Image: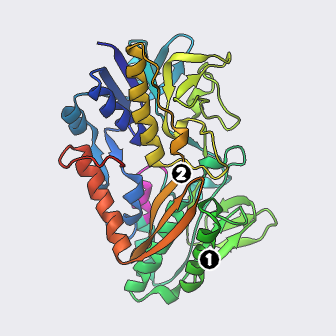
């Protein structure tokens, strides 16, 4: 039985482990955490609508259910030329026939980033956000700033949706407490039209949301630094802020810089349509694949790194490894599946967002949209535990 090692226990890594086991490979998943953190539903932790524990999936439980091996350790290096990887506790390993790199991305640096909290960073920052928000609610007033950054070297590495969702949820949370008028909410971003990749119609609708909810906008100015109580921009203008939530743009995982893998200008692993990793000598690896946020996506200017794309890449990679092992060439690519798909939650409703090569749309879903996203979170957990059937399109 051929051995497949997966580096990374996020959406892409877990999906790859599940599907590779379906093809009867000997699968080992390596993760630096013993749980998978469900980032899309973490937006409710700061407002107290969801608990931190409910937002986790135990990887040991999943390994028992699906039959893959689990090793909780931190990857510190990958050497494609030596067909090896190094772990913090267990040292250098080369005991695999295929390697799937699903390590996720690093974050672009920013001056004073320690003065911010993020809903898309280390999971426990969601609890720190809750503590800060609760303290300001106890105080009775405050200035709250929410935003995200960009990476000009790779437009797909921007993750703005959770920032929009969180500010809308905080607005709704404060409104329920009768305190909304005591708080100034501002959304900031260095680009002039944040959210444009969702499409022109969606961009106009987002602007309507901001106006209706009395959320201030601060767009089109590069961020110079984050201070303890303010954000400073390139023209030395500033926003006062009692709480700054900032999602830094992604960049390539820094531990791959000397891996022997070919990296894009932004540091992501270059792959072909079938997720086979490219080596720094220009050749395709015959046994290393890269999936999810760690990989450089090809395609439309509006493409985005999203969880459902990571899972498509994972399933295709499992299929492609099986094809290679059976000396067949019916490989499946990810590029035809590139789209933007999300339910953007507002706390009291949501908007369904979709874009592909032919159309883009944002459909408001008052009330029911919020429960639709709640339902997705429950579906994700139960389907991964094999307690309910997996939908073919999810």
Q: Residue at x 59, y 56 (%)?
A: 358
How far apart in space, not on screen, are marks 1 and 2 (Cα)? Answer: 22 Å
Q: Residues within 10 Å of mark 2 (few under 14, many from 20)?
A: many
The quarter holding residue 21 reads: top left
Which colour style is shown? Answer: rainbow
The local secondary structure at tag 1 comes to helix
Q: Residue at x 40, y 73 (%)?
A: 134
Q: Is residue 20 magenta?
A: no
Q: Position of residue 289 (x, y in %)?
A: 49, 25
Q: Residue at x 37, y 59 (%)?
A: 41
Q: Position of residue 180 (x, y in %)?
A: 47, 86
Q: Which residue is mark 1?
A: 207
Of pointers 1 and 2, the one earlier in the residue sequence: 1
Return the residue nearer the eye: 309 or 7. Answer: 309
The quarter holding residue 205 reads: bottom right
Return the residue nearer the eye: 73 or 257. Answer: 257
The stretch in magenta equals 121-129
Q: Which residue is mark 2?
A: 339
């Amino acid at each position: 039985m051929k051995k497949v090692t997966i580096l990374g226990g996020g959406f892409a890594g877990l999906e790859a482990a599940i599907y590779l086991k379906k093809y009867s490979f000997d699968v080992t998943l390596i993760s630096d955490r013993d749980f998978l953190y469900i980032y899309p539903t973490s937006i409710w932790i700061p407002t107290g609508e969801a608990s931190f524990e409910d937002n986790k999936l135990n990887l040991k439980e999943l390994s028992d259910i699906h039959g893959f091996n689990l090793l909780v350790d931190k990857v510190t290096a990958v050497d494609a030329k030596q067909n090896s990887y190094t772990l913090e506790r267990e040292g250098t390993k080369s005991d695999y026939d295929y390697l799937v790199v699903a390590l996720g991305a690093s974050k672009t640096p920013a001056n004073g980033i320690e003065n911010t909290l993020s809903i898309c960073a280390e999971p426990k920052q969601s609890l720190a956000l809750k503590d800060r928000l609760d303290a300001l609610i106890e105080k009775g007033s405050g200035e709250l700033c929410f935003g995200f950054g960009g990476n000009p070297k790779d437009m797909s590495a921007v993750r703005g949706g959770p920032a929009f969702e969180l500010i809308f949820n905080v607005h709704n949370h404060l409104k329920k407490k009768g305190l909304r008028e005591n708080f100034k909410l501002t959304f900031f971003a260095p680009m002039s039209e944040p959210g444009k990749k969702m499409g022109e119609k969606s961009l106009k609708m987002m602007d309507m949301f901001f106006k209706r909810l009395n959320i201030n906008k601060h767009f089109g100015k590069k961020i110079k630094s984050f201070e303890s109580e303010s954000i400073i921009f390139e023209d030395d203008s500033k926003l006062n802020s009692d709480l700054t939530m900032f999602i830094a743009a992604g960049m390539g995982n820094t531990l791959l810089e000397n891996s022997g893998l070919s990296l894009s200008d932004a540091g992501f692993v270059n792959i072909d349509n079938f997720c086979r990793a490219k080596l720094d000598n220009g050749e395709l690896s015959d046994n290393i694949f890269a999936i999810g946020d760690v990989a450089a996506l090809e395609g439309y200017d509006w493409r985005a790194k999203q969880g459902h794309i990571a899972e498509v890449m994972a399933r295709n990679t499992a299929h492609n490894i099986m094809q290679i092992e059976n000396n067949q060439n019916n490989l499946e690519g990810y590029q035809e599946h590139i789209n933007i798909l999300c339910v953007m939650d507002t706390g009291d409703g949501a908007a369904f967002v979709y874009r592909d090569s032919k159309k883009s749309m944002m459909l408001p879903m008052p009330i029911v949209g919020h429960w639709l996203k709640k339902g997705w979170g429950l579906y994700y957990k139960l389907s991964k535990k094999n307690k309910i059937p997996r939908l073919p399109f999810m």
